[in-house]
Image (cartoon, rainbow, N blue to C red):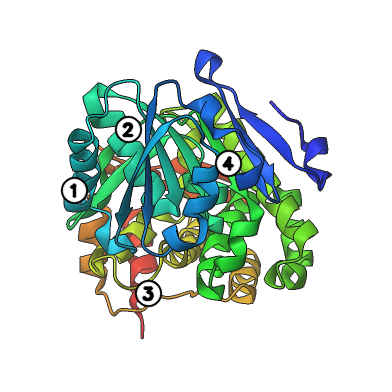
Amino acid sequence: MADRSSIGDKASSSIIVDLGDRSYPIYIGQGQLSMVDFGRYIKGKKALIVTNETIAPIYLDSVLSQIPDKTIDVVILPDGEQFKNLDTLNLIFTMLLEKQHDRTTTLIALGGGVIGDMTGFAAASYQRGVSFVQIPTTLLAQVDSSVGGKTGVNHMLGKNMLGAFHQPNAVVIDLNTLASLSDRQFSAGMAEVIKYGLIADYQFLQWLEANVEPLLNRDEDALTYAIKRSCLNKANIVSADETEQGIRAILNLGHTFGHAIETFQQYKGLLHGEAVAVGTIMAAELSVLTGHLSPLDVDRIKNILTAFGLPLKPSAKMTPNEFLSLIYRDKKVLDGTLRLVLLKTLGDAYVTDGFAIEWLQATLNKACEA
């Protein structure tokens, strides 16, 4: 495992997600698409690149040029969270079957979190499991969804309710791909970056507060540091708890509330990171009611989210009862008991069911106020 001292280096570097014989590297740096030998992660003669109609025209040729001497098929999917479903997933399976891919094939996810999650789930399922590689092209995917092996698709009744844990062979993060990212998508990714400071890395939170302007300007040094530190935090947590039996659950700060918003909006409203930002404020408000955070702490969280252009309220009007119903479909509900990720202090998260229902109701009421 890399240590924190290594993340200050600007040069290309790698972090190891330590899972024993299933450990894998995260390559981070400028120009990685033309530097990494993707062929070393393809054990058979064939591979399938899964990408979308937005990313394919920009980066597909670069990846193909790095995989000589292999038969490479490509499936290009529609772009958007609303397409992260079983119908779209079946397009991947159809291509694999039509092109006669066997158990030695490797899937390559080229795109954002939607592409990564669906490709990983297809890899986990096809012929009971094949290899895959993550090439995340959005900030959110680079710092969060591409690392850790969570894969899946959405259902109209709940986000990410169909999926599997399936680790990639490698994660290749080329910071140059962020040049094609819209400002809104960039801000959505920052919600997950901020999360790491809130749940486990207070020094990083302080650094983020001091570096809003260079990050918004996509300064190379600042962005490299933020991505490396986020990935290191994620890798350390995943190495300690691969299948979310304990500490890994803190990575879901704001996600239970955020997923409810996304499901209510049928995945066509707030982006995932935007919904997580709103959910983070709700978790912080509830943490005040539990006696941990102070209102000043909540203001501090609101300030940094606002600085990066993130919303603090759901964009579509929801009733508290609608919110509550969707929350209870979350994966963190066990035996009918809702567990949430809350904050003891800034930089220290925990998972608990130890909150009064009236506190939760008050939090939902406040979030749903006009």
- Residue beneath disc 4: 172
Q: CA distance from mark 1 to mark 3?
A: 26 Å
Q: CA distance from mark 2 to mark 4?
A: 17 Å
| Mark toward the viewer: 1 or 2 | 2
Q: CA distance from mark 4 to mark 3?
A: 33 Å
Q: In the displayed structure, would residue 156 be above or below residue 299?
A: above
Q: Is residue 47 left or right of residue 143?
A: left
Nearer-the-camera pick, 130 or 256: 130
- Residue beneath disc 1: 86
Q: CA distance from mark 4 to mark 1?
A: 26 Å
Q: Is residue 324 left or right of residue 218?
A: left
- Residue beneath disc 3: 314
Q: Secondary structure at mark 4?
A: strand
The crowding category of the residue bearing disc 3, from other C-alpha atoms within 10 Å (few below 14, some 14 to 19, many at least 20), is many
Dividing the picture into quadrants, the one containing residue 186 is bottom right
| Mark toward the viewer: 4 or 3 | 4
Give the x, y percent position of residue 99: 23, 35
The crowding category of the residue bearing disc 1, from other C-alpha atoms within 10 Å (few below 14, some 14 to 19, many at least 20), is some
Count of numbered circles in the view? 4
Residue type at mark 2: give it.
Ala
The crowding category of the residue bearing disc 4, from other C-alpha atoms within 10 Å (few below 14, some 14 to 19, many at least 20), is many
Residue type at mark 3: give it.
Pro
Q: In the displayed structure, would residue 216 be above or below residue 255?
A: below
